[in-house]
């Protein structure tokens, strides 16, 4: 049985650390013709800083938009999804994938608790528990 991939959700905070997961999603999309939804979780209410990236949220959004445009330039059907944060990144991304009937989520190893109100622990592991589809966890760059 062949596995058909129509929609790939890839989480990005706009940082260079997200490039590995974007490259994986790009390769899969080019091989399968799937569309890529780049999911960017906004800063929690009252915060102006992106978790882990150490920069303002507005800058992160500009970077994510550039990442989506880069995918489009190489022929990938890419779109941006700005998702409101409830403090649990894994839950927000899993819910978005469910809404889009995604076939795959691409993410990287990332520790929780980087955003105020976010549960501590491994976000990718929690995402694998919550996701409605397979999750590809891309290793961190060396």
Image (cartoon, rainbow, N blue to C red):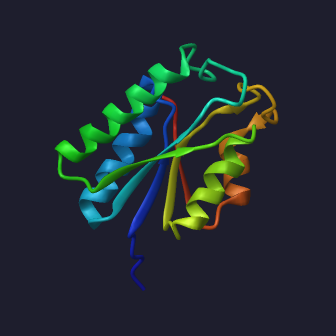
User: Closest to the observer: 78 or 44?
Assistant: 44
- Give the residue drawn at x 25%, y 53%: 76
Q: Is residue 32 left or right of residue 91?
A: left
Residue at the farthest bottom position: 1
Q: Is residue 120 left or right of residue 139?
A: right
Above or below, comparing residue 58 to residue 30 in the picture:
above
Quarter holding residue 113 = top right
Q: Is residue 119 visible?
A: yes
Percent x, y of residue 8: 43, 59
- Give the residue drawn at x 31%, y 49%: 26
Quarter holding residue 3 = bottom left
How many tags in the picture? 0
Quarter holding residue 95 = bottom right
Q: Is residue 142 visible?
A: no
Q: Is residue 110 left or right of residue 34?
A: right
Q: Is residue 123 left or right of residue 30?
A: right
> Can you say which quadrant of the picture contains the N terminus?
bottom left
Percent x, y of residue 98: 60, 66
Percent x, y of residue 42: 59, 34
- Give the residue drawn at x 63%, y 42%: 84
Above or below, comparing residue 74 to residue 96 in the picture:
above
Above or below, comparing residue 10 to residue 102 in the picture:
above
- Give the residue drawn at x 81%, y 36%: 119
Percent x, y of residue 100: 51, 66
């Amino acid at each position: 049985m062949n596995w058909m991939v129509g929609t790939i959700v890839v989480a990005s905070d706009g940082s260079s650390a997200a490039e590995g997961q974007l490259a994986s999603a790009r390769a899969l999309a080019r091989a399968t013709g799937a569309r890529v939804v780049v999911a960017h979780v906004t800063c929690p209410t009252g915060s102006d800083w992106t978790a882990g990236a150490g920069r303002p949220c507005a800058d992160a959004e500009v970077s994510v938009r550039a990442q989506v445009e880069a995918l489009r330039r190489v022929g990938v059907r890419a779109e941006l999804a700005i998702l409101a944060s409830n403090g649990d990144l894994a839950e927000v991304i899993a819910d978005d994938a469910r809404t889009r009937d995604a076939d795959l989520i691409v993410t990287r190893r990332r520790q929780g608790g980087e955003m105020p109100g976010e549960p501590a622990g491994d976000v990718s592991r929690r995402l694998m528990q919550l996701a409605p589809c397979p999750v590809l966890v891309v290793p961190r760059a060396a």
